Amino acid sequence: MAQVTTEASSQRKSLSTTVLRAMSLFGGLQVAQILCSAIRMKLVAWLIGPAGMGLFGIYNNMVEMIGQLSGLGMRTAAVRDVVDSKGERLAIIAAVIRRWGVGLGMIGAVLTLALAPALSQFYFGDSDHIVGIAMLASVLFLTSVLNSEQAIMQGTKHLSKLAISSLWGAVGGLIVSIPMFVVWRINSIAPSIIAYALITCVAALLCRVRTGEPPKSLTPRATFDEGKQFITLGFFMTIAVFVELLSNNIFLAYLNTTADTNMVGYYQSGYTLFNRYIGLVFAAIAMEYYPRLTQVRDSRYRSSLFVSHELSLVIWVLVPIIGIFITGAELIVRILYTDDFLVIVPFMVWGITGTVLRAYSWCVAMTILAKGDGRIFVVTESFSAISGLVLNILCYRQWGLTGLGWAYTIWYACYSVVVTVVYIRRYGLRVSRSAIGMVAGAFTLSLVMAYAYLTTGWVFPLIITAIISVVSLRRLIPMLLARR
């Protein structure tokens, strides 16, 4: 009995080490990518001005919108099929994913070319930008090819190749863009976006996973049939993303109509701080967590164990970050924005408490994707998007900008209940009591720090953050440094 307990403890430590190393690898990558992106934006603002910033943003939004529609969620959905494949089967699936990547990329490129006149008229009210938009067709193709290679890397757990190729793309894209900005000024916007996509794609192809040649029997018809499963899941994911984007745009339109553009700017600024930047933690973890959870999706015991384990580690990592955000809220706003944006501090402080519930719901909801349950994924994500929209409107009408922070927390509380019901009732899975206790304790502590900061200042939250950080580091660093 003692030997079994020792082996189980050893396996948990090994798993913790693997997760933390993946987290540190992709966390560092996310920081590097943000830094490169920030430098690019600074250069555009400095060398080209507001017109360049606006054009850069519009072009990137076009690429993202068309990419979401034409990509059919293949980047995430295909990972499941790669995880399940070995040997010759892996060669077949990898070839199918690459062929679908090329096909979907061509569809995205053709769609961009076809819509170029309409998009130019819609966004700019003229036909002067048709050529610039048409040039972006190549970006859709390159991004689709890139997504297929990254799905294979993630599914085969070649995470170092994935990180290295992404870093090369970010740094190389920045280096190539600088002379374009200097020489061509505003005419460099579309070419710089293309250059970034090209370098990132080439880097991924150079680091591609060698899976062997597929059999000659893999005809175009067989390629289509093999790809239907992950494309079906990807289609459901695309619907969910569309509902989320639609809900967000409806609220922004409501906010712009009810208040003004400044309020929209305040909301976007605060939301970016606690949703997008904290989201980098989840993005880093997902690179290792999603394939691992997919691999054990048919075992209730192992799925439950992995979810509980992941949740515990995420909380240990997340709570010190939350404390730093709360304690340094004003300083962070002053550094990243200006004093005019200090009005978002209460919104940001209350909103970041909801990231604890977001961490819980994220770890649990990932099982839906791991099991390939597309319809349930659409239902849960649509509920999330619609409830978020309703809560944002109600809380803003009642309490203004600060109320949007409370809406975020309530939103993820509601979403957590829904995904927990699915997790328990549909899949028969469980979250350990210790993990639930950690979530409850972390959420309560976050609320206490937020209230203390807004009523008495930063001293008490700073003391709590320092204590939590020390305890967390003492627990996590030995795992990170341990040998596998």
Image: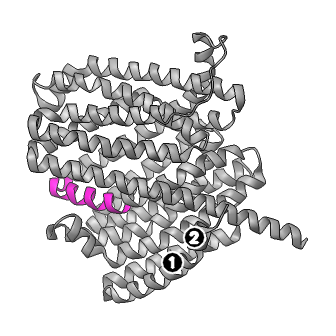
**Is 415 within the magenta?**
no
Side of 448 relative to 225 (left or right)? left
Query: Is the residue 332 above or below the residue 218 in the image?
Result: below
Label 2 residue SS: helix
Give, as a single range, the part of the protein colored magenta: 257-274
User: Mostly what secondary structure, the magenta segment?
Assistant: helix
Residue identified by numbered label 1: 444
Query: 395 or 378, which lies in front?
Result: 378
**x%, y% of residue 36?**
29, 51
Residue at the image position 69 percent from the left and 44 percent from the top: 295
**x%, y% of residue 216?**
65, 11
Kind of residue at disc 2: Val
Kind of residue at disc 1: Thr
Residue at the image position 18 percent from the left and 28 percent from the top: 122
**x%, y% of residue 380?**
54, 46
Asked whether residue 343 appears in the rendered view, the answer is no
Label 1 residue SS: helix
Farthest residue toward the right? 1
Residue identified by numbered label 2: 439
**Is 260 within the magenta?**
yes
Query: Is the residue 403 above or below the residue 428 in the image?
Result: below
Query: 476 or 74, which lies in front?
Result: 476
